[in-house]
Amino acid sequence: MLQLNFDPFPVLQTDRLILRAIGRADVEDLFMFRGNTQAMKYIGKPVLTNIGEVQGLIEGYQEHVRLNRGIIWGITLKKNHRLIGTIGFHRIEVENSRAEIGYILRPDYWQKGIMHEALDRVIEYGFEELHFHSLEARIHPDNLASAGILLKNGFVKEAYFKEAFYADGQFQDTEVYSRLSEVNLSGGLN
């Protein structure tokens, strides 16, 4: 069984990005996309309406990390360190060596390859450092951009669930994508 420990918080880097912990200093930047209806269109969670809700969200992220239940990184550009998105494993099944990955990015940073770059690095960390056997992502079926990013990063579409969850006053469909590690639990290649 996996043994997770996110202390100290693992900071990840790519050519353009730093993926880091989210803290109180990020409240306004986080509100810029979690309070944005365009950014939240396919997320299936309520659009945040005030700074207090954002502070509560950050406290939830920090609690998840402290309890080793999940980890969310803030996506920042190396050139300015401002929070432009989040990515992480918000649900980890230790007993199954499996995690659900989720992400969101400010709309003014869409179509620039940023999420592909961040996702690639987080997948690498999940398989090589945390030793997950598999990853999954659940997306809204109309979110073609997210489906494209997942496919580009080696995920395959596994399922389509009709009316799988309730959000925005109605039941919503969801698609499930997954990716298996290239290394099996005994340490050899599959």
Image (spheres, rainbow, N blue to C red):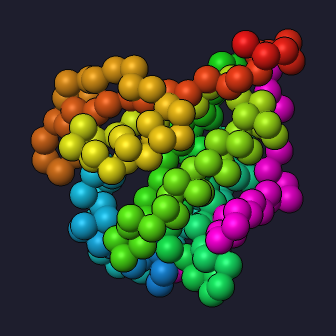
Q: Which is nearer the eye, 70 or 124?
A: 124
Question: Going 86% across and 59% down the picture, which residue do you hit?
Answer: 8
- Residue 54: quarter of image: bottom left
Residue 8 drawn in magenta = yes
- Residue pictured at 25% horizontal, 67% vertical: 38
Query: What range is drawn magenta here?
Result: 1-27
* Point 79% across, 16% down: residue: 189
Q: On the rendered structure, is 141 left or right of 23? A: left
- 142, above or below 77, in the image: above
The kind of secondary structure the magenta stretch mainly shows is loop
Residue 37 versus residue 83 in the image, above or below:
above
Q: Position of residue 136 (x, y in %)?
A: 51, 31
Residue 40 shows in this picture: yes
Q: Position of residue 1 (x, y in %)?
A: 80, 20
Q: Is residue 22 visible?
A: no
Relative image position of residue 112 (x, y in whole percent): 45, 67
Left or right: 163 with respect to 29? Answer: left
Image x and y of residue 19, in percent: 67, 64
